[in-house]
Image (tube, rainbow, N blue to C red):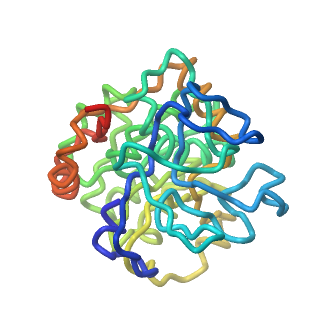
Amino acid sequence: DIHVLTNGWPKPTSYHAIVGHEIIGTVVRAGEKSGHKVGDRVGFGAQAGSCGSCDSCHEHLEQYCVKGMLGTYQGVWEDGTVSQGGYANFFRGQGHLAIPVPENIPSDVAAPLMCAGVTVYSPLKRFHCGPGKKVGVVGIGGLGHLGLQFAKAMGAETFALSHSANKQADAEKLGVPAENFIITKDIAATAEKWARSLDIILCTSFQSDLPIESLFFKVLKPQGALVLVGLPEEKLPAMYGQQLVGKGLTLAGSLVGGTDDLREMLAVASEKDVRPWITVRPLEEASQVVKDMDAGKARYRYVLDCRS
């Protein structure tokens, strides 16, 4: 939301922009082919529409739709109107992207799962997170605190990578053993100590100087995977390919999740009690909430209550 509001990404923002891309609500109108009825409780993530006919859509990877992912906001509908997001009393989206929410997950808890939750779940699933795997999460924040929970719920041993010890207590509450909290301030020393330790690194940070070559590649095991889910506003650092090739590494990205992953993610969250850490505030405080989020005050997601 902040990147769009501040025009921080390469694609210029189309103003006026109503943001908000983690939405839970009750259906008030439903098309005949939507798959829903009035009164259903459903959620939308970062996607409001897709073509429904390309290979990606048929494989339930709608976020990679050949005609482009129509975002919850800043997407352009066929009639030329721009989609607007969830900082509002009503929202419109395609029915196949409206996902039913399990009964045991309250709406305020479910909302962050619709984007942040699936953003970390999808790549963990893709790279076979599970028993016997060691998964490191870079950045303990809105994405990272869910990444740690989902990795543990899927059976992996979890590690947290952070530039200081400030969030170690939080990491331990999220299931990371004290000895698996890795402080990365001294990159060279960290790379040496933890060389070839991790199977997967899930990078939720969007800092401009990511230590991809100097740290992340070094601490990965051969055939390990570094997956970027944070989006820096600048280009990635230039690098040589020796480590990438020499260790058979994968440098990957992942964009939210398709409808299958959304349903699976919610099922895992429901069964394994994966819950975002949230602070609920009224919609009327949206402007201040955005400022507080940008200032790093959230622990770790703000949820706006539109019911007032």
**Residue 183 spot, x, y in % from top left:** 28, 49
Q: In the image, is 122 to the left or to the right of 182?
A: right
| Residue toward you, 122 or 101 | 101
Residue 224 against residue 167 in the figure, above or below = below
Residue 137 visible in the picture: yes
In the rendered image, the quadrant that contains the C terminus is top left
Q: Which image quarter: residue 31? A: top right
Q: Position of residue 30 (x, y in %)?
A: 64, 38
* Residue 165 horizontal side relative to residue 108, left or right: left
Q: Relative to residue 54, is residue 11 drawn left or right?
A: left
- Residue 9 shown left or right of residue 186 in the figure: right
Q: Residue at x 47, y 68 (%)?
A: 74
Q: Based on the displayed image, in which of its 4 quarters is residue 37 positioned?
A: top right
Percent across and percent down for residue 122 are 62, 46
Please identify the quadrant where the N terminus is shown. Answer: bottom left
170 or 71: nearer the viewer: 71
Residue 94 at x, y percent in the picture: 65, 50
Find residue 291 and report its image quarter.
Answer: bottom left
- Name the residue: 61% across, 40% down: 98
For the point 34% across and 33% down, which residue is it?
A: 179
Q: Nearer the viewer, residue 87 or 6?
A: 87
- Which residue is at the front of the view, 11 or 218? 11
- Residue at image coords 48%, 37%: 113
